[in-house]
Amino acid sequence: MPTSSIVAIGDELVGGFTLDTNSHWIAERLRILGYPVKRVSQIRDRPREIVDQVHRELADAEVTDIFMSGGLGPTPDDRTFAALADALDKELVIWEETRARIERRVQRMHAMGLLESPELTEGNLRMARIPSGPAHIFKNRVGMAPGAVYEASGKRIFVLPGVPMEMKGIFTEELEPQFLGGGSAATVREVRFSFAVEAKFYPLMRELEETSPDVSVGSYPNFETKELVIRCVGLDPKRVEEILDVIRKRSRELGFTPQPA
């Protein structure tokens, strides 16, 4: 099954200074849209690490879509586009459409008294430098940093800003309607137990993993409420319901009664 991967870039994420809400949000949207996520990675703002991660994602035969966020801003530690150009063996160029859009925004902000000068700074130009040959450029109606799409090794690489408001704006207004219309939304069903022992379900879950690989089964205990949730996820609603019935039946044999649906 084709899957997606998410790569969050930033020293502030890896260092524990900032919570990576972008990856959680993107993963949730992809699940709803029917694009299952295989892997979520966090890496530092180091060109070599970004290049290596891109190469790992491109080498994974199961991954068809790669979502990268972060490192597109105006400061020297924003290195994602430069590293991506290196990874894809592309030239880093000033994209005129993006430069012109940034210039218009700078001039508007100057007219409003928010900036001292209407001239572009090196930081502004830095945001306009992207790898050559993008398949698509996102406009970013909220901020200045552009988003972009690249195609390599039969995969799509979506590059998004790290500022959550900008990332979400591009994703919902442009990326989602233009590029994510053909997914098959997953069916998610749960069965809940009170005071159930998670370890008792391990043999059943191993059995289901071998006999029913089309349905993902996971157990999630809540130690505060003493509740155990077993969640089934799959593309075929009928198969998900069948596995859920098996879990309900076998749980009774183990001495645990499912909560009412």
Image (tube, helix red, strand yellow):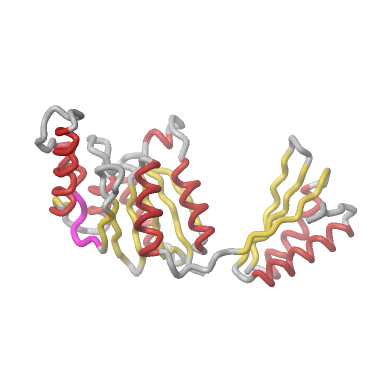
Does 105 sit above or below residue 16? below
Q: Quadrant of the C terminus?
A: bottom right
- Does the magenta-highlighted stretch encompass residue 175? no
Q: In the rendering, at what x and y percent does residue 232 appear?
A: 67, 60
Between residues 85 and 55, which one lies in front from this camera angle? Answer: 85
In the visual, does 231 lie left or right of 6? right
- The image quadrant that residue 191 belongs to is bottom right
Residue sitting at 39 percent across and 43 percent down?
Answer: 43
Residue sitting at 9 percent across and 36 percent down?
Answer: 119
Q: In the rendering, at what x and y percent does residue 121 appear?
A: 13, 35
Residue sitting at 62 percent across and 63 percent down?
Answer: 187
In the visual, does 135 lie left or right of 61? left
Q: In the rendering, at what x and y percent does residue 208 appear?
A: 72, 65
Q: Where are the magenta residues, as a range?
A: 129-134
Count every numbered label the image shows and give the total: 0
Q: In the rendering, at what x and y percent does residue 70 appear?
A: 34, 43
Between residues 236 and 166, which one lies in front from this camera angle? Answer: 166
- The image quadrant that residue 78 belongs to is top left
In the visual, does 40 lie left or right of 56? right
Q: Residue furthest front?
A: 112
In the visual, does 177 lie left or right of 191? left
Residue sitting at 59 percent across and 68 percent down?
Answer: 235
